[in-house]
Amino acid sequence: MRKQIAAANWKMNLTLTEGVQLLDQLLLNNYELNENRQVVFAVPAPYLAMAQAKVSGRAHIAVAAQNCYNKKSGAYTGEISVVMLQSLGISYVVLGHSERREYFNESNQFLAEKVNIALEHNITPIFCCGEPLQIREAGTQNAYVAQQLEESLYHLTADQLKQVVIAYEPIWAIGTGKTATSEQAQEMHAYIRAQLTAKYGAAVANEISILYGGSVKASNAKELFSQPDVDGGLVGGASLLADEFKVIIESLK
């Protein structure tokens, strides 16, 4: 079975004290984690060392950075390098989140460079893709997502691609009042896997975890994760609530 992942994306939320309390609450639980079930906490940069210390020694629980730069070092004030992440023992990094694309104008080509440098330093990219509302309403979401994959990932070898986690975000269903059904999630996840199959073959495509990033909550996680091509979730708001995220973790296949 592909790795099933519950990834918490705290975004720019919580004070240090609140973050410590949330992790302490969640780590009290003995989840049934194994090689196929993984929990990842993508915390704000100032909390990376704290979070890594908290999860150290806990099997199948890891910490992710929410971003990194496309250079190893240099005069890039305010940026975070993969070398810094590596020195902290961080094993994942979220790349290409819809908010980074929208607010910071990150292009597919720029993200390809970030993917490269993360892989070079043995940090697993959680690569985000997905379409905004106007693209979904125009019915061109498949081509839109296919272009994101092609321009950011298709330069990779098969072995490199197998080290990437993909997260599909239906941006049109986040904070718009519109709801993506589990069937719509499955439809796009299956399309993404079909595109990977066409490029790299079924054996490779079937190893790649594809997470769903469209307002996953305790109330819908089980249904979403039951879909054959949905391998867990990249969870925003619900990951800030211990009781909610606990249920989401327990909903993994």
Image (tube, helix red, strand yellow):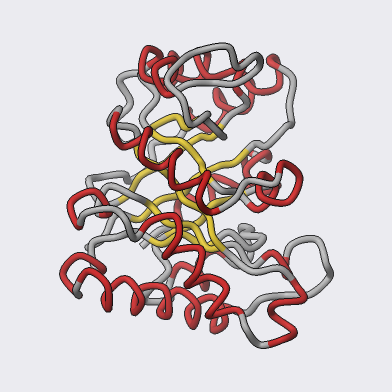
- Identify the residue at image location x=64%, y=36%: 10
- Quadrant housing residue 61: top left
Q: Is residue 175 left or right of residue 31?
A: right
Q: Taking 163 as reference, is 25 above or below it?
A: above
| Residue 57 pos. (x, y %) | 30, 20
Residue found at the very far right of the displayed protein:
177
- Identify the residue at image location x=74%, y=84%: 137
The one of 64 and 110 positioned closer to us in this rendering? 110
- Quadrant housing residue 218: bottom right
Q: Taking 26 as reference, is 78 above or below it?
A: above
| Residue 173 pos. (x, y %) | 72, 69
- Identify the residue at image location x=54%, y=60%: 129
Q: Taking 29 as reference, is 72 above or below it?
A: above
- Identify the residue at image location x=56%, y=34%: 66
Query: Is residue 251 something that shows in the picture?
Result: no
Query: Is residue 191 something that shows in the picture?
Result: yes
Q: Is residue 58 left or right of residue 80?
A: left
| Residue 205 pos. (x, y %) | 26, 68
- Quadrant housing residue 190: bottom left
Q: Quadrant of the N terminus?
A: bottom left
Q: Is residue 114 left or right of residue 143?
A: left
Q: Quadrant of the C terminus?
A: bottom left
The one of 95 and 239 positioned closer to us in this rendering? 95
